[in-house]
Image: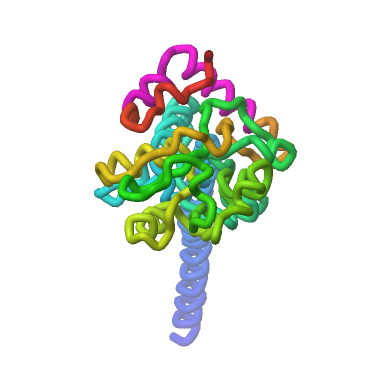
Amino acid sequence: MKKTTLVTLITATALMMLAGCAKAPAQGQAASEPASTDTAAADKTEADAAAEGDRKTFTVGFDAEFPPYGYMDDNGEYVGFDLELAQEVCNRKGWELKKQPIDWDAKDMELSSGAIDCIWNGFTIQGREDAYTWSVPYVDNSQVFVVKNDGNIKSKADLEGKTVGVQKDSSALAALEGDAADLASTFEDLVQYADYNTGFMDLEAGAIDALAIDIGVANYQIANKGEGYTILEEQLASEQYGIGFLKGNTELKDEVEAVLLEMADDGTVLKIAKEYSDFGMEDAICIGK
């Protein structure tokens, strides 16, 4: 009886061991299946990442208070002539446009840090020729003085003893500190503003007597504010606008410039300019001429 029991126990033990061995491969196979799935998922993720890497984001730095080139509309959207040009370039290149408003005083830091790819916002070439890698000029622009109609300022000579406003780090300021320094020395005061919107508010309030400004911006402001302002016939200075890239970044400059020239040739630049005809953009276009 004990012998039979012993045999039975041995047999049962052997069967249990065999069963355990039979299950081991199944467990191993089950464990390997998720690993195979994970590998496929990883491969898919890498492929997606590679595909996403093919889509380039083009980040344009601009002054959001510099109409008609770049500004915020009533719907809270960033719009403007330069931003429309940039959008068309991106459409043709298959890039995504990122509109990055910047503090104009910090534009060089934004560009050198890589936060933006270029400065495209009524950006004057003259006086900055060696500081950036420039596209071809696309707009002829002038610096002018805006005054109120109810004043007695009819010419630049009448600015003597007056308070004149200007935007910080602007082309108008560069002119007043450069070739027109003699004229500026006759002013009672030269007030610098962070943006031209504030300057126009002070002009309207009588805090300043005149505002030195880009003619395109002046036309835009006057068109929006209605009658009551005059642009003096005598210009402060003349200049051209270009797209400013980081010094030495000729590869990106060449890519963007090639599309911009193509847009000039097929009439797209002029078509976009006509949307801003109230501000004299059509007459200001110089690219392709």
Q: Residue at x 44, y 30 (%)?
A: 85
Q: Main secondary structure of the magenta part?
A: helix
Q: Residue at x 52, y 35 (%)?
A: 235
Query: How many numbered tags mark residues here?
Result: 0
Assess whether residue 257 is covered by the magenta stretch. Answer: yes
What is the x, y in percent for residue 107?
A: 59, 52
94, 253: nearer the viewer = 253
Determine which quarter of the picture holds residue 241. top right
68, above or below 205, in the image = above
User: From the image, which quarter does the N terminus lie in?
Assistant: bottom left
What is the x, y in percent for residue 259?
A: 53, 22
Q: Is residue 137 left or right of residue 229?
A: right
Assess whether residue 237 is covered by the magenta stretch. Answer: no
The answer to whether residue 66 is seen in the rendering is yes
8, 277: nearer the viewer = 277
The answer to whether residue 69 is seen in the rendering is no
207, above or below 123, in the image = below
What is the x, y in percent for residue 161?
A: 53, 57
Q: How is the image coloured?
A: rainbow
Q: Residue at x 43, y 58 (%)?
A: 208
Q: Is residue 197 left or right of residue 123?
A: left
What is the x, y in percent for residue 256?
A: 57, 28
- The residue furthest bottom is 2
Q: Which residues are magenta?
A: 252-275
Q: Residue at x 58, y 41 (%)?
A: 118
157, 102: nearer the viewer = 157
Q: Is residue 238 left or right of residue 231?
A: right
